[in-house]
Image (cartoon, rainbow, N blue to C red):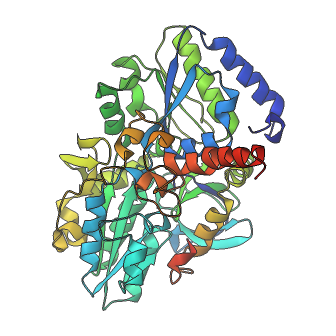
Amino acid sequence: MCLAIPGQVIELFPDQPNIAVIDVVGVRRKVDLGLLQDNLPLKGDWVLIHVGFAMSKISEQDALDQMRTLRALGEAEAAMQEIQGYGLENTENPEAS
Amino acid sequence: MKFVDEFREPEVITRTSAEIRRLADPSRHYRIMEVCGGHTHAIYRFGLKDLLPSNIELIHGPGCPVCVLPMGRIDDGLAIAQNPEVIFTAFGDMMRVPGTLGSPLEHKARGMDVRIVYSPADALKLAEKNPDRHVMFFAIGFETTAPSTALTLLRAKAQGVHNFSVFCNHVTIIPAIRAILDSPDMRIDAFIGPGHVSTVIGCRPYEWIAKNENKPLAVSGFEPLDILQSIVMVLRQLKADEARIENQYKRVVPWEGNRAALRAMAEVFELRPYFEWRGLGFISQSALRLRESYAEWDAERRFEIPGVRVTDPKAAQCGEVLKGVLKPHQCKLFGNECTPEHPIGALMVSSEGSCAAYFNYEHRKTAMVTSISSGA
């Protein structure tokens, strides 16, 4: 649970500065940017995501490295399940964890 | 054993491992604690012990939030969910953690409305979608997760969502480290500091460990090379008889932490006078609760909870394992009554728990070698 998931900011909303659409290996979900409000990411930036909130801005290389670490740890599938579950997409199926 | 060439940059790994052997004084025994459960998982998964000399012992620390939560708190959360109006929400990690009368998932099988969420923000969203129900979020986690709960509560207040509450079990890492250092049966030479907790709190809160306790600490990333480099950092300090806080994970962890996250936490949470940790007992000022100004969203204030202290099953030695006094396989129940499929103690539930990590990587490996060598 303490492992963060890397994603790229692909859409921002001028009327909702605290929300971004991020892409994690092709899966797109909205995440909350509130924890980065002092230094908001721009479109194209990479962030580390934890429980639906972007926590830190990172470089593209670090994002690739982090994804590889998740794979090596056997956590990539759980991470993708988490991303897919954001926005209540998957909540009716608790056994899925 | 993991072959070194399976790692990225195998030459650097080999060089770093050799550097560790060069730095470690053969006449000494080193006990280095990795505080974070994510590191424990990585150490077992990558077989890093095989890259260290035998006189470096890695002690697994208390940094798995599911593991340190006492059973009474799970019972309390489930007691709230007995109310038919309530939807119980929690992260997937919590779902198989046993309470006295079973895990949240077992309660669901008996008809309780239990749902997994992947974000506290989604629990709030569920409340907005179900105005005739009450959504309670069972919050766990260290400072990595607490800011997200805090922001969710700020949003609930701002949006005027009143059918939502948080059952807060957030804990803080520094008092747990202090409790371990104060414990008479523990002798730790140095620490590997948590990676993602430190993105929030930064490195400053660890400084007392170096200044007052004279122990080195290196905040570390999660790759094999990160962990090995952190071990090099603390060994160099020990060799030079120094104690400093070093940041191996600079690419992600700013020295000052994340101020926006710390502000959100300060706005919503205050320290509890004390909180019980499984295995470590009551630790003063080690956990968070909602401030009076958020009383309306505090499940503990809104609902009656039994608040009964539940002791762990006598035979389970989770406490000793959590403190690093026993290795996972030295517990009487390990691998027999208690397995990841049928966990008795919480350390066997989470993949970050040292028992589950040990079972999945060490125990299964040994069992396989035994069955191959016996021709089975």
What is the x, y in percent for residue B320?
A: 37, 39
What is the x, y in percent for residue B315?
A: 34, 49
Q: Nearer the viewer, residue B75 or A88?
A: B75
Viewer can see residue B45: no
Q: Nearer the viewer, residue B49 or B262?
A: B49
- Identify the residue at horizontal 48%, vertical 42% (top origin): B328
The answer to whether residue A83 is left or right of residue A91 is right
- Identify the residue at horizontal 55%, vertical 42% (top origin): B40
The answer to whether residue B132 is left or right of residue B375 is left
Tell me where residue B106 sits by quadrant.
Answer: bottom left
The answer to whether residue A52 is left or right of residue B323 is right
Q: Nearer the viewer, residue B129 or A75?
A: A75
What is the x, y in percent for residue B77?
A: 28, 69
Viewer can see residue B229: yes
Q: Quadrant of the C terminus of chain A?
A: bottom right
Please say if B25 is above or below B173.
above
- Identify the residue at horizontal 37%, vertical 45% (top origin): B317
Tell me where residue B295 sits by quadrant.
Answer: bottom left
Numbered circles on residues, count = 0
What is the x, y in percent for residue B123?
A: 41, 75
Please say if B171 is above or below B322.
below
- Identify the residue at horizontal 62%, vertical 73% (top origin): A84
Report the residue that reaches farthest toward the bottom: B132
Q: Nearer the viewer, residue B133 or A93?
A: A93
